[in-house]
Image (cartoon, helix red, strand yellow):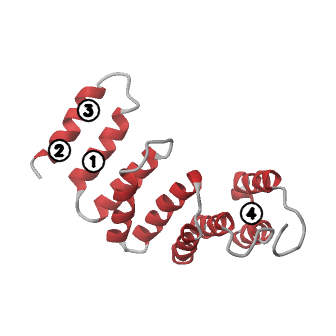
Amino acid sequence: MNARHGNALDMETWEEQVELLWTRFDDYSETSFLENMENLTSQLPIDHPRGLFETASSYDSLGHSDIAVPLYQRALDFKLGGSFRRQAIIQMASSLRNLGRTNESLKLLEAEKEGDSDDLKDGVDAFLALALTDSGREREALSITLKALARHMTRYSKSIKNYAELLIADK
């Protein structure tokens, strides 16, 4: 049952509607997009982690990192799971960096880098490289970027990995 409206919610249909809204993101004004997302998330219980995540992502995508960060944190506190948990970590870390809270961003991303390898690994590396650059650790940032790039190269992969290691060897 939907806690707000008292009727059953088909999560598969709900997810399709959320995906469609994101697909058409550029077709909406900021206000219209937020209203549409609110209409969707209001179908879930108030502290549903997925609803919190989608709301945070909406504000984040519209440049409101200050609003997004506490919403990401609430989604995580309410046990957001699966790949959405990892997306929330990455996106929250990016927002923290945008807010000048680079050390918090680094802490989240460095911990996440130690986690499982999945299709979001390159995302973790990319945002970690940005946070490292903001903190004045450009050689480490370049090393991470080159290692991530090397994973996709058909030639020169070993050489690029070796050069990436040399960048940080004399730290």
Marks 1 and 2 close (CB-CB < 8 Å): yes
Alpha carbon separation for disc pair 1 and 3: 11 Å
The residue singled out by tag 2 in the image is 167
The residue singled out by tag 3 in the image is 160
Alpha carbon separation for disc pair 2 and 3: 11 Å
Q: Residue at x 78, y 72 (%)?
A: 42
The first of marks 1 and 3 along the sequence is 1
Residue 90: x and y in percent read 47, 58
Marks 4 and 2 close (CB-CB < 8 Å): no
The residue singled out by tag 1 in the image is 142
The first of marks 4 and 2 along the sequence is 4
Front tag of 4 and 2: 2
Relative to 14, is 64 above or below?
below
Q: Residue at x 36, y 40 (%)?
A: 148
Disc 1 element: helix
The residue singled out by tag 4 in the image is 28
Residue 67: x and y in percent read 56, 77
Q: Amino acid at mark 3?
A: Ile
